[in-house]
Amino acid sequence: MIDASLHRLHEFLQPDDAELEAFSLARKSRLTFRRRQVVTTQGDPVSSVYLLVDGWAQSSFDVASGRQMVDVHLPGDFLGLPSMSLTRAAETITALTAVTVDVIPIKALAGLFDTAPRLALAIFLISQQERVRQMDHLAAVGRTSAMQRLCGLLLYIHSRLKAINHAVDDVIDWPLSQEHIAQGAGLSSVHVNRTLRELERGRLIEREGKRIRLLDLERISDFAGLPARTSVREPGWLTGLPRRAA
Amino acid sequence: MIDASLHRLHEFLQPDDAELEAFSLARKSRLTFRRRQVVTTQGDPVSSVYLLVDGWAQSSFDVASGRQMVDVHLPGDFLGLPSMSLTRAAETITALTAVTVDVIPIKALAGLFDTAPRLALAIFLISQQERVRQMDHLAAVGRTSAMQRLCGLLLYIHSRLKAINHAVDDVIDWPLSQEHIAQGAGLSSVHVNRTLRELERGRLIEREGKRIRLLDLERISDFAGLPARTSVREPGWLTGLPRRAA
DNA sequence: CGGAAATTTGAAATCGCTCAATGATAGTGG
DNA sequence: CCACTATCATTGAGCGATTTCAAATTTCCG
C-alpha cells in the first residue's frame, strides 16, 4: 500500500522511480502543527505550497461577515495552490488536528513542469478535481437546504476517508466543531446544531463525543442529492507523455 | 495590443514565437454558438476543453433544487478544464451571447506539458486564479447578503471587462437575465429584481434595457466587501523555465 | 480540578422565498 | 414591417427557513 501523502497523485498515474525521486526532492522540509495552529494566513506573501502528510486541515477565507471554510483537507492534499497565482495568499490554512506538512517552495513545484511533465499534469488534474469539489460545494451552499448541505458534507468526508482507509465501519473520528461545520456550510452554528440533532432523531446518524456514525448511507445520500463523481484513471494522454526525469 | 483570446496567458508570461505556435497548434477547430445554445452538457463524456475566443458564456451545474451558475466567462477563458479530471463532465457550458470557441482536444492540451512547460505552468496558474475566484464566490454566497452578492458580481464583471477594454465609462452591456444572476448568486430571481431596484434607488447603478451603468464604484465596492486580488506577473520561477517548444 | 471551548435550547426577528398576476421587450416567421 | 409568442421584468402578499440573542449545560484540555 502506498504512502497516504501520495495517494492523490497515484489516482492518475503510476509514477516511476525517477519521478518519485523528483517529487521527493521538491519536498524541502517538514513542519508540524498542533490543533488550531495556523499554517498560513490570508494576506501573507506567497513563497511555498504544502503537501499535507498527516492530520486534517482546513482552508478558509475571512470576510467582514464571517469566515467561509472552503475545504477540509486530508493526507495527500496539496495546500495553498490557489495562492500561487497571487502576490498575497487568499486563504488561511489551519490545523484541525495535529498536522504534519511538507513544504514545497513554489520554485521547486515549477521545476517539476520541466523535469517531470507527467507529474506536473497529475498535479494539474488534482487541481481540477478540487475545482469540481468547489463547484459541488458552491451548488450546495447556493441551492440546497441546511439538511442537504450537512448530508453532503458527511458523505464527502466519508468518501474521502474511505479512500485512505480511515472510515472503518462508517464511523468517523470527527475533529470539526459545529462552528467549523457552520463555516463550511454557510450556516449559523446554532442551526447546524439543530439540524444535526434532527439527523439523529431521524436515525440517519449517531453521535458520541467526537465520533459520528453514519447509520444509513443510502438515505443520507438521497438527501444530499449531489452526483457521484468518477475521476479518470491513468488516461493515455497522461501516461503516454515523456517522463523526462532530470 | 494582443488578441483578447490570449490575454489571460499573457498575464503571467511573455510567450515566445515557438510557444505561441505550439499553443495555436493545440487549437484544432473553431465553433460558433448562438445565444442560449449549449456548448457541453453535464454528464457528457469529456474529450476536449475550449478556449473562449469571443462572447460571453457561463458554466453552471444543475442539482434537483435548481441551477447554480459557477462562473461567467469572457474571451480568453478556458472552458471545461475542471471536467478534464472526470470521465463525465461536471459542468454545463452555455452561450450567453453569440459565442466563438476554439476546441482543444485534451490530448493536445496534455501535449503542451511536454512541448511547452512554461505555457503549461501558465495554464496551471490560470486554473489557480479560477480557484481563487471560486473561493470569493463561495464566500459571497455563503456569508453575505443579497445586496453584497450583487455588488460583488457587478464589480467582478466590471473588472474583467476593463481588463479587455470592454467597460467604457463604467457602462456594461449586460447579457445576463435576472434569472441568470439569481442562479449565480444563489438567490431567487424575484429577490434579484428587488435588490437591483434598491441599488437603483440608492443611485449606485442605473439601468436601461440591457445596459447597466455603475454610478459609484467606490460605494459598490464598500458594499461588496471582497478583497482586491493581485496576480503575480511574470514570476522568475515561471519565466526562468526552459521553453523547449517542439 | 478549573477554565475555556463547545453544545444545546428557547424565543423573537428577518431576510429571502414562493405563489401569482401583470406589464414590458425582444426575437421570429410570415 | 407587423403580429405573435416566448422571454424577461416587476410587484404584492404571505410564509418559512435560518438567524440572532441569550442563557444554561456539558465536554474537553491542561
Image: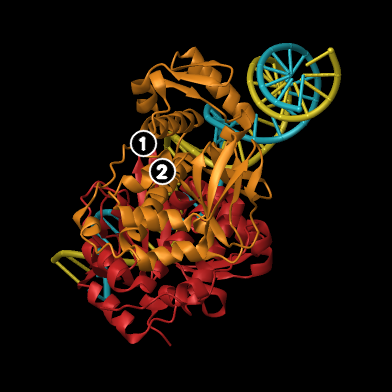
Chain colours: A orange, B red, C yellow, D cyan
User: Chain ID for label 2?
Assistant: A
Which amino acid, mark 2? Asp
Q: Nearer the viewer, residue B113 or A134?
A: B113
User: Chain ID for label 1?
Assistant: A
Residue A226 is labelled as: 1
Residue A240 located left or right of residue A95: left
Residue B101 located left or right of residue A209: left
In the image, residue A113 sits, relative to residue D7, either above or below, namely below
Q: CA distance from mark 1 to mark 2?
A: 7 Å
- On the image, the x and y values in percent for residue B116 come to 32, 74
- On the image, the x and y values in percent for residue B105 come to 22, 64
Residue A136 is labelled as: 2
Q: Residues within 10 Å of mark 1 (few under 14, many from 20)?
A: many
Secondary structure under badge 2?
helix
Which amino acid, mark 1? Leu
Q: Residue at x 32, y 78 (%)?
A: B244
In the image, residue A164 sits, relative to residue B18, either above or below, namely above
Q: Nearer the viewer, residue B21 or B130?
A: B21
Residue A181 is labelled as: none
Q: Are marks 1 and 2 in contact (CB under 8 Å)?
A: yes
